Each structure stands twice: as C-alpha cells, then as structure tokens.
Amino acid sequence: MNDLSHASTSSPLAREVERRRTFAIISHPDAGKTTLTEKLLLFGGAIQLAGQVKAKADRRNTRSDWMSIERERGISVVTSVMTFEYQGLVFNLLDTPGHEDFSEDTYRTLTAVDSAVMVIDAAKGIEARTRKLFEVCRLRDIPIVTFINKMDREGRDPFDLLDEIEKTLALSTVPMTWPLGRGRDFAGTYDLQAGHVRLLDRDTAPIPVTAGDSAALAAAVPSIDADTAAEEIALVREACGEFDLAAFREGHMTPVFFGSAIKNFGVGDLLKGLGDYAPPPRDQAAATRMVAATEDNLSAFVFKIQANMDPNHRDRIAFVRLCSGKLTRGMKVKQVRTGKSMSLNAPQFFFAQDRALAEEAYAGDVVGIPNHGALRIGDTLTEREDIAFLGVPSFAPEILRRVRLPDAMKAKKLRDALQDLAEEGVVQVFRPRDGSPALVGVVGALQLDVLQNRLEAEYGLEIRFEPSEFALARWISAPTKQELESFVTSHSFSIAEDLDGDPVFMAKSAFDLRYQGERSPAIVFADIKDVK
Ligand code: G4P
C-alpha cells in the first residue's frame, strides 16, 4: 500500500520529495481541529506542551498576536503552516482560518495541499462547513482522510456516521479502526488492518486479537460487550470492503479513523495513516504543461501573503508552496509575472511558534519569503522556465462598500494601504473607471472589520464604510478584444478595475446582472477568477 518502497533506488531529490506530506485539516468549527493540531504537533515533537496552538481567546504569544480583533473575537483569522517530522517523514500542516468569513483564504490554502484530514464530531456528523470545504477538495481531487473525533463522549452510531459520509459526500468509507464501547464506556479501538486492540488511557502496547475471536476481545477489553463488538467488526469488514489506495488517491474513498483528540487517542494511528497513504507532492498544472514534483528545477507559487506579522518589524511574508525541485537559501529565482529576478536570502520555515531560516527546502514544502510587496498571491517563481501555475482563485465579493475617509489629506496614504491589503488578499479593491472613490469587496462581513482595524492599527487611518450603489462584481471577458471594449465603453459607469487592472462589471442587483447578460451574450461574467 505504501509506495515509499522504491524510494531507496531513486535520486536524493526524489527521496526528499517522497517523504513529504503536505495537508490541511478541514472541519466545522468546534469539531476539534485545534485540539487535533496540537496533538499532531506533539507527536512530531514540534511543541513541548499541548495548549500552545490554541487558536482561541488565550492565544497570546503566537504570531497572530498582532491582530487584536482576533483576540477580541476569539477566532483564528490567520492561515499559517506548521512543519514537523515524524518517523522519517516531513509533515507540512497548513492551518486554515476557522471562521467562514475567511473562506477565501481557506480555499487558497487548499490549492497548496496534497491531502486533507476531515475532522468530524461524532455527535454531530457532517456539518455545513465541512461539506463546503469537502466540495472544494473534491473539485481539486484532494484525497481525504477522515478522523471521527470526540469518541469519548456520547455520539451517534458509527455505522450511521459512515452511512452519512457515503450518502451526503458520495465518498466510500473504509474504517481503519473501529471503536470499542461508546461514549463514557469508550475503551479503545480495534485496528482492522493490523488486527490489534489499542486501549484508551493506558500506555500499553497494542494487544493482538484475531478478528471474530470474541473471547480474546473480552479478555483484552473486559469493560465492553465483546460479542457485540466482534459482530460489529465482522460486519464492518464485510460491508466496507478493502482499502483501495488508488480509489483514495483519486478522491473516491476515505480511510476512517476513530479517536479522541482531547485524550490524544487515535492521533498516532491517524498520523501513521497519513504517512502510509496520503500522497507525496503531486504534479501541478501550469498554463503550458504539468510540472512533476521531482523535476530538478525549482518552481513554486504564492498562495498567501501576510503583512505585518511582527509589529516590531513591518515585514510582509509570502507563503510559497514549492512545486518542484529544491530551494537553497540565497538562490536566484525569476518572478514570472514581472520577469524580475529575486534572491531568496531569507526563506523561512514555520513551526508551532517559531520561524527558522530555511537553508534547504523541497517540493511539497511551504516557506515564507519576506518581501516588500514584490510578491502577490498567485505569482509563480521559477529557477529557469517561464511557467505559470494555475488555480489560485479569487472569488467575487458578496459585499461591496465605499471607503469614506474623513481626513481628505490622507487620500494617497489610503490608496497605498488599500493596495497593500488587497495584495495581501484581505479585501479586494475595485477602482471605478469613472474616477469615483474605490470600492472594497469582501466575501464575509468580518473581513470589513479586519480591514478597518488594520487600517487604523497599521496605517493610522480612520475610515468609515458607506453602502455602495453596486451589489455584485463580476470579471468580464469576451471572445474578441473589440467585443470587450465595446461593452466597457457602453457601460463605463459600471466598470471598475481590479488589482491586476482586469475589467470588472459592477451590477446594481442580480436582476441587473441577468439583464446585462441577456443583452450582451458575447460577454462572459465570471464569479471566480483564476489568478495566474
Ligand atoms: P475547533 O478548532 O475545531 O474549533 O475545535 P477545538 O479543538 O477548539 O475544540 C472545540 C471544543 O471541543 C473544545 O472544548 C475542545 O476541548 C473540545 N474537544 C476537542 N476534541 C475533543 C475530544 O476528543 N473529546 C471531547 N470530549 N472534547 C473535545 P472547550 O475547550 O470547552 O472549548 P469551547 O467548547 O468552550 O469552545
């Protein structure tokens, strides 16, 4: 099942690539993502004590400290990455903001992973946000490993939960472990692959038990009804079939682990599952060709920008996913969008709380590159060839507002600040062609609070938002330049430019948009833009 077997015969680069697992955790708020992240990092020895990753109100000493709004609201707004090693493998865990108003960030982060762990609360099953994030993973064929959490509490019947995953997500399930006892009587799991019992709250070696041997099961776990458990194990083996690596990698099947993050139970099995089954860095689609992770030359793309992470040093970090080759500190790369060359003098790795200079990094890794605004979301960096990776999307905003600045003397400063924050992906900025004040667009209302807060804290700008006459923004294109230009000219009061100078049609309502669409059939109105 494990395709590391050929690793010893391949090149040093291929060996490094093969041992990387870059993944994210998708879940509904409160399912246990933060707790599971802490426990995963503990396994990897990346942190000494659990409780340090806690993305809740007590998140005092972490990188995200700069954003007071995050503390006030007790949510994690920041996407970050944590790297840890476990049993010879390098895991890059890309964290995603918990709040749905930051879904754009989350979607972009999912463009940078090769697999995802779907955490489900055993009492709640599939919840709205899990389903939404799952759909994004499915669009990109990202394989999913499932962790059913909170087994130490009263939850739903495990068969029911599997059935729900199969029905609502159209995803076959293959349990890797099976819970023994339920709720308060949860005593451990039976490993369906290895044929052993692992007990909760006891630091003992796994106990080998042949499937179907209920006497041996009763001896290993006296607190449970062994006959029922043995029947369930027989049933689950028969009903769910064998784990099929290819089906998993294609996104049709998910291995399922049961556990309790808070009790640090089942987390080791999950990590082993990720190591054994989750794919190493995948090939990435560029505009002209597919790029294999094991190609010698470095290629990478920016999926996230974060400014002012450290209030003492006004820095700006571009989070870059390496797609092929090897990065060596100090090397020169080309930024394909501008054609400019840049030296990677201070690429950084991120751990639970720290950063460190990355002397070397390989395809699959995520590094932070400090810069002063040269790098933008979606940018490709390459060692040689001019390739441009596809698929870091921008989403049409759901809310549009005009930014009102009481102090007109600061208009230039506001313009620059909005540019900075738009490049960072905090908001989108649309500059109307008719010269009227800029509009900001967001997917979730909380982003507006973040914008206001940051403009004040970081740029000393006090602003207000005013309603806009426009309700929707759509990127427009047409088969010919002429057709596009003619539309733009005849609708000049409804046309704005985005950050890249691409034309955007601003509609007053859904009706207006539909009406314009019918009148101008040559024009394509897009609500997603693939940043190139
Ligand atoms: P999230 O990042 O997905 O939002 O979830 P988080 O880890 O913060 O966990 C949400 C709550 O669920 C926390 O309760 C946490 O302790 C609890 N939890 C996580 N894993 C387990 C588990 O395996 N079993 C049980 N019983 N509880 C678990 P909390 O600290 O009380 O926070 P809150 O509920 O006040 O937000």
Image (spheres, helix red, strand yellow):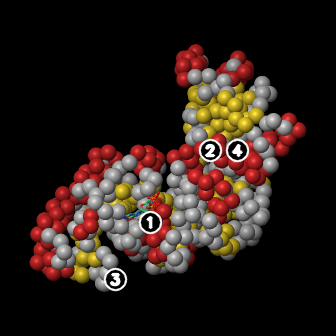
Residue tagged 1: 36
Above-or-below relation of 179 to 398 = below
Name the amino acid type tagged 1: Leu
- Real-space Cα distance between discs 3 and 4? 50 Å
Q: Is residue 243 visible?
A: no
- Real-space Cα distance between discs 4 and 2? 9 Å
Q: Position of residue 504 (x, y in %)?
A: 66, 30
Name the amino acid type tagged 3: Asp
Residue 55: image quadrant is: bottom right
Q: Horizontally, is 291 left or right of 420 in the view? A: left
Q: For the residue labelled by badge 1, is the local secondary structure a helix, a strand or a loop?
A: helix
- Real-space Cα distance between discs 2 and 3? 45 Å
Q: For the residue labelled by badge 3, is the local secondary structure a helix, a strand or a loop?
A: loop
Q: Earlier in the sequence, mark 4 or mark 2?
A: 2
**Foreground residue, 274 or 94?**
94
Which residue, as the protein is rendered here, is positioned at the far right?
409
Residue tagged 2: 447
Q: Earlier in the sequence, mark 2 or mark 3?
A: 3
- Real-space Cα distance between discs 2 and 1? 26 Å
**Foreground residue, 200 or 110?**
200
Residue tagged 3: 203
Q: Position of residue 92 (x, y in %)?
A: 53, 67
